[in-house]
Structures are given as structure tokens and as C-alpha cells.
Image (cartoon, rainbow, N blue to C red):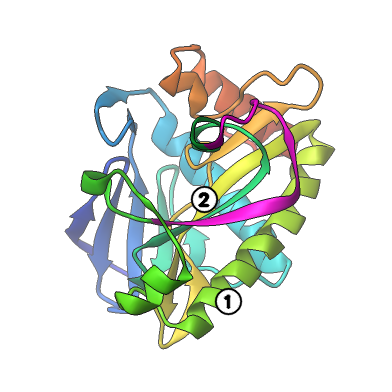
Amino acid sequence: MEKREELFSGKAKSVFKTDDPDLFVLQFRDDTSAFDGVKVEKLKDKGKVNNLFNAFIMEKLEQAGIKTHFVKKLSGTESLVKNLDMLPVECVVRNLAAGSICKRYGIEEGLEINPPTFEFFLKNDALHDPMINDYHIVSFGWADPTHIEEMKKQTFKVNEVLKDLFKNGNMLLVDYKLEFGLCNDELLLGDEFSPDGCRIWDAETRNKMDKDRFRQDLGDVIETYKEVGARLGISFD
């Protein structure tokens, strides 16, 4: 497998072609952003930490029967992934109230949400990722009804697997977002799962252990990401 030219560069990751059109190299960079790119910074070792974190989580999900685009880890900052036709929607599950749902509905942060909620958002920074529903997705051709139901099913299955995983590390999986894509008409989990795309709290103190540390200027962002990983059994050496 030969890494070739860069295909796409996002806010924190870059995608490179390979000599196999069905496989890409996903590179995690040290770039960090929040508020649709308004706040931007480089954090040392972030690319490596998120790559190793994502590889660990994707492997756990694969073991649980959830199909992903992840193939294997290539280096500290790079992984080999399948070429997906990404669907332009984000799937969000919330186990506890935090972030935008508190602002939207006047809900107190930390409220347990039972059963967990599911929300769709349009992946579009220019529009600030607006909330959408099944009808929008079908009407505007972003995905078909079969894929909508499968995304919901897989996202809740991820919740079952990861809530227990984080619980064993004395942590709460507050909420998270997932993205899916199609590979030969098969729906696969794509993008990444790292502290950048979820909220994680210490189960006892409820200290924030995710990207909110960057958003809210709480400090020790990467050190805290490493602590989360260590509790899960991830080695960053």
C-alpha cells in the first residue's frame, strides 16, 4: 500500500489517496478547533493521541459486530481506512444533558436522559450544523429511509457498547456524534471516535474530560485525553 496525494484536509484530519482506490490514509493532526472554526489552536501530541484512541474504539466496536471503515493503524498519527461515500449528516445520542440541548430547551446540565435521545444534524459548518429530521433527510436526498433507520440502530448499539466501556473506567459517556458512509452500498461507521467528538465526565466528580476543556479554557486538554485513554487501557507510548 502506497500513500499518495492528499485528497482532503479538514479541521483536524487529512485524507490521502493510496494506490488502492478502495483504501485511504487518515492522518490525525495536532490542529484543534471549536465553534465552527472560530477558535483554533495546535496542541502537541493531539494527532497521535486521537489516532490511537480512535483505533482502540473502532476495534472494540468491530468486536461487538459494528461495521466500520477502520482497517488498521499505520503509525502514531495515521490509520488505513476504507473509502466511503459519506452521508452529510451527524448522528447524536445523549445520555446526560450538556451543551446545545441545555441551551435549546433550558435543561439543567447533568440531567440524566432516560431513555437516551437521538438527534440528526446536517454536517455543514457554514450553517452551524442545524438540527434536521428524517423528513429533511429524505426530501433533500441526503440518505434514504433504509439508511436512516440503520444509522439509528447502529448509533444506539454503539451506545450500549461504549457506555459500559467508559463505566468500567469510572467515567460517564455523556453524549457523542457519529458519521456514516456507504461502501459498495453497505452502511459503515466512518470518521472517528475520540474525545473531540464526545463528552466524557469523571463518574464521581463529573469533571469534564473531553473537548469541552478546550472550548471552555479549562486547560490540560491532551493530558486529560491521555487520562481517559489510560482508564480504558490505551497506551500512548
Residue at left offset 39%, top offset 78%: 138
As displayed, is residue 204 above or below residue 219? below
Amino acid type assigned to the residue bearing label 1 in the image: Glu
- Relative to residue 147, is residue 88 drawn left or right? left
Nearest the viewer among 30 and 164 is 164
Residue at numbered disc 1: 150
Nearest the viewer among 132 and 34 is 132
Question: Image quarter for residue 140?
Answer: bottom left
Say what secondary structure mark 2 lies in: strand
Residue at left offset 45%, top offset 37%: 48
Say what secondary structure mark 1 lies in: helix
Which numbered disc covers residue 177?
Answer: 2
Question: Image quarter for residue 21?
Answer: bottom left
Question: Image quarter for residue 88?
Answer: bottom left
The image shows residue 158 at horizontal and vertical percentages of 67, 59
Amino acid type assigned to the residue bearing label 2 in the image: Lys
Q: Earlier in the sequence, mark 2 or mark 1?
A: 1
- Residue 116 counted in the magenta span: yes
Residue at left offset 24%, top offset 27%: 38
Nearest the viewer among 4 and 58 is 58
The reply to whether callout 2 and callout 1 are in contact (CB within 8 Å) is no
Q: CA distance from mark 2 to mark 1?
A: 15 Å
The image shows residue 44 at horizontal and vertical percentages of 38, 23
The image shows residue 69 at horizontal and vertical percentages of 48, 68
Label 1 crowding class (10 Å Cα cut-off): few <14, some 14-19, many 20+?
Answer: some
Single out the residue that lies furthest toward the left.
5
